[in-house]
Image (spheres, rainbow, N blue to C red):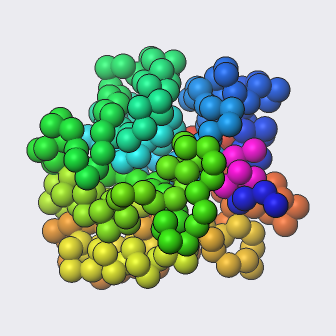
């Protein structure tokens, strides 16, 4: 049985890669060819989630952005491409993925605007000691260690199953890195929404929950959640986004983001 994440990765890359016949060892592409991305053949591959996450940050956020667990740099690069005035930092735990992300920064000629740091959010590099980011985004591992058998591939395991850092650590670090009235945005599984909201409770307001519906009439499997430290406005539940039509193809609204590089308004 193919995991949802692997299916989404294959569908997205086959549909929108610059060269549909080449999936690895050469550059794939995101946003209909606007962003190049080298990816691993057997390890973790970016699919739709980091693209949607990057699209959810308003273009008015022309300050500095931190992408936690940046992987190969997909979300960081998609945001930097859409918001030319931005400066982006990606933090990545795995040395080989951090190296790949740096390669992708060079591939997209963004060395002056996108910086990749290798490090652990539990023991962050000194470059992050000050915090003060306008926006922090994260696509953390979706499964807690006690609810999953890690895949044999180390990069897939790190991307999909929590390690030493649990969700509470990710949220706590993101909030510490965000300046007052900035914003923290996570994409996560819908069945962990209650846990995510509990972690934000009393620490941030202006929360927006944005469901991602697989098809019309289907239950949401993933959600995007934005929270703002120093803001006290009540939570809002958005109408969300339907990703696929009944025939399995992407919806028009999804295509405007995944192919055309548009913004996702929460």
Q: Quadrant for residue 80, please give it.
A: top left
Q: Specify start and end residues of the magenta stretch as a single range.
A: 5-10
Task: Give the overall secondary structure of the magenta segment.
Answer: helix
Q: Position of residue 171 (x, y in %)?
A: 31, 64
Viewer can see residue 32: no
Q: Position of residue 48 (x, y in %)?
A: 62, 50
Q: Nearer the viewer, residue 119 or 7?
A: 119
Q: What residue sits 31% from the left and 33% below the top? A: 117
Question: How many labels, in total?
Answer: 0
Q: Residue furthest left?
A: 130
Q: Nearer the viewer, residue 144 or 215?
A: 144
Does 199 lie within the magenta span? no
**Going by the image, does 41 lie left or right of 50?**
right
Q: Is residue 23 above or below residue 220?
A: above
Indicate the quadrant containing the N terminus: top left, top right, bottom left or bottom right: bottom right
Q: Position of residue 34 (x, y in %)?
A: 59, 28
Q: Position of residue 203 (x, y in %)?
A: 21, 74
Q: Quadrant for residue 21, please give it.
A: top right
Q: What residue sits 49% from the left and 75% below the top? A: 192
Q: Residue furthest right?
A: 247
Q: Nearer the viewer, residue 194 or 65?
A: 194
Q: Is residue 211 above or below residue 136?
A: below
Q: Is residue 141 above or below residue 102?
A: below
Q: What residue sits 63% from the left and 48% below the top? A: 152
């Amino acid at each position: 049985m193919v995991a949802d994440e692997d299916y989404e990765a294959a569908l997205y890359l086959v549909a929108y890669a610059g060269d549909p016949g080449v999936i690895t060892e050469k550059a794939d592409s995101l946003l209909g060819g606007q962003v190049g991305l080298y990816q691993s053949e057997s390890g973790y591959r970016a699919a739709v989630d980091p693209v949607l996450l990057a699209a959810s940050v308003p273009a008015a956020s022309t300050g500095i952005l931190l992408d936690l667990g940046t992987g190969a740099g997909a979300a960081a690069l998609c945001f930097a491409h859409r918001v030319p005035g931005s400066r982006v930092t990606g933090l990545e735990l795995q040395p080989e993925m951090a190296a790949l992300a740096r390669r992708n920064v060079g591939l997209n000629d963004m060395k002056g605007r996108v910086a990749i740091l290798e490090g652990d959010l539990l023991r962050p590099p000194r470059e992050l000691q000050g915090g003060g980011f306008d926006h922090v985004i994260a696509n953390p591992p979706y499964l807690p260690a006690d609810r999953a058998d890690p895949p044999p591939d180390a990069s897939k395991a790190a991307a999909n199953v929590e390690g030493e850092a649990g969700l509470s650590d990710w949220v706590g670090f993101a909030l510490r890195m965000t300046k007052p009235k900035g914003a923290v945005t996570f994409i996560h599984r819908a069945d962990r929404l209650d846990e995510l909201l509990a972690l934000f409770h009393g620490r941030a307001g202006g929360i927006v929950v944005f469901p991602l519906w697989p098809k019309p009439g289907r239950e949401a499997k993933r959600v995007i959640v934005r929270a703002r430290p120093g803001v006290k406005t009540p939570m809002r539940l958005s109408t969300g986004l339907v990703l696929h039509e009944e025939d399995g193809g992407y919806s028009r609204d999804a295509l405007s983001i995944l192919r055309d590089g548009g913004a996702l308004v929460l």
